[in-house]
Amino acid sequence: MASESVSYWQRTAPVFLLSTDMPHSVDVAVIGGGLLGAATCYWLAQAGVRAVLLERTALAAGATGRNGGFVRAGTAGSYPQAIAHLGQETANAVMEITYESRALLRQVLQEEEIACDYREPGALQLAITEAQGEQQRREVETLRTDGFSAEWLDRAQVQDVIQTPLGPEILGGRFLPGQGLVHSARLVHGLASAALRHGARVYQADVYELGRDGNHVRLRTSQGSLSAQTVVVAVNAWMSKLLPELTRVIMPVLEQMLAYEAVAPIFPTAVSVNINAGEYMQQTPSGNILIGGCGFVAPNAGIGVWKSLPTSVVQEAIEQVLPRIFPSLASKLRVMQRWAGLLGCTTDMHPIVDYAPTLPGVIFVGGFSGHGMPFGMRFGQLLATAVTSGYLPPALSPFRLDRPSLERWELP
């Protein structure tokens, strides 16, 4: 298997040049050039805060630039699972905050004229067993009872959405109207460009260490030392590298994807199916089908892996998905690109936003468990509010580090 690990999103986004002429002091430093870092920096700049964004290599180099490009409101798992694991109040809070984030995304894309192929065709989760169909029907009922849009589509209705014959296993599916798809890297580039226009600065700098220096946070970086009043750490899977106390809280997990050469339009929506514990795909406006998942077939399910390199066992499993669910596509599929990326995962599949336990002046955000896109805009706005006000807004309370549902990972 080739060691190439540049994603489709990264390859099809224009180059964004990062400055290395970093200042010695700033009001706020945001570490991490993914969606959360870019969104936080954008909202800080909007508020007139002197903020800088620091990225180790390139914007959208991590999970944001290696994902499926889904902007699906709600929790990483199913809504009933979230209620069972997190409680009704927290599950509802997640739904509300992700719908708010989607509204903010629409607003900012329009106001800042960001072109990133954003559209809202909905999200379809296929059912290939009776048990899955029953679970999805229950989820639809629960969502609708709580005031959220959801539909159960039978096989014929699913076929109306998919423009190729369905495989015999497909019984129907849960459809969430209005859910979004996006070109992830172009979104991050657009937000960073907008932040620059509003007065922020973006630098290439690898942050090695955080510490206190009097009333400030001192950052030791590849471009020298930087002093900041407040630091927002948004590095997700790499959180423990800067905040070692979170080693057993946010764990890197390897996720893999591939892209097929362009084919005629097959499906407009986000599509997912549970064959090897969650596969997902979208067809881009240019016709390329991007598909990922199958991580459970990897040794230890990819948990604790630090290198973003695709592996044969997972890639071969991914290649089997589309021919299984849409058999007529098999002869038309030609792989053009493979990649991998690191997710920052928590044991309850629920993100964390909180102050660093042992380092005053530092706020961290991460642990999205492969589901960060729906939170990005609203979390960035709330983090900017936390910086300017000096306290975490109440809307972030369900995401605190001390929540009862959050257990620690067992290390080897």
Image: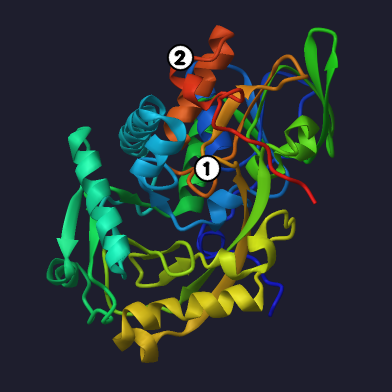
Give me the residue at 56% from left, 26% from top.
404
Q: Position of 101 compared to 45: left or right?
A: left
Name the colouring of the figure: rainbow
Residue 158: image location, x then y, percent:
19, 67
Q: Distance between the residues labelled 1 and 2?
A: 21 Å
Residue 311: image location, x then y, percent:
66, 73
- Pointer 2 local density, CA inside 10 Å: few below 14, some 14–19, many at least 20: few
Q: Position of 189 compared to 168: left or right?
A: right
Query: Which residue is at the front of the view, 138 or 351?
Result: 138
**Dividing the picture into quarters, in which one does residue 214 lie?**
top right
**Dividing the picture into quarters, in which one does residue 246 lie?**
top right
Q: Which residue bears the numbered disc 1?
A: 349
Looking at the picture, which amino acid does disc 2 mark? Pro
Query: Which residue is at the front of the view, 291 or 320?
Result: 320
Looking at the picture, which amino acid does disc 1 mark? Met
Residue 123: tell me if it is visible.
no
Residue 173: image location, x then y, percent:
24, 62
> In terms of sequence position, does the residue under pointer 1 or pointer 2 come before the other?
1
Image height of 256 relative to 46, above or below = below
Image height of 61 relative to 278, above or below = above
Query: Which residue is at the front of the view, 122 or 135?
Result: 135
Give me the residue at 26% from left, 64% from top.
268
Which numbered disc covers residue 394? 2
Which numbered disc covers residue 55? none
Residue 218: image location, x then y, percent:
82, 21
How many circles with numbers are drawn on the protein? 2
Image height of 166 relative to 297, above or below = below
Q: Tell me the SS state at disc 2.
A: helix
Of the 4 image quadrants, the one containing the N terminus is bottom right
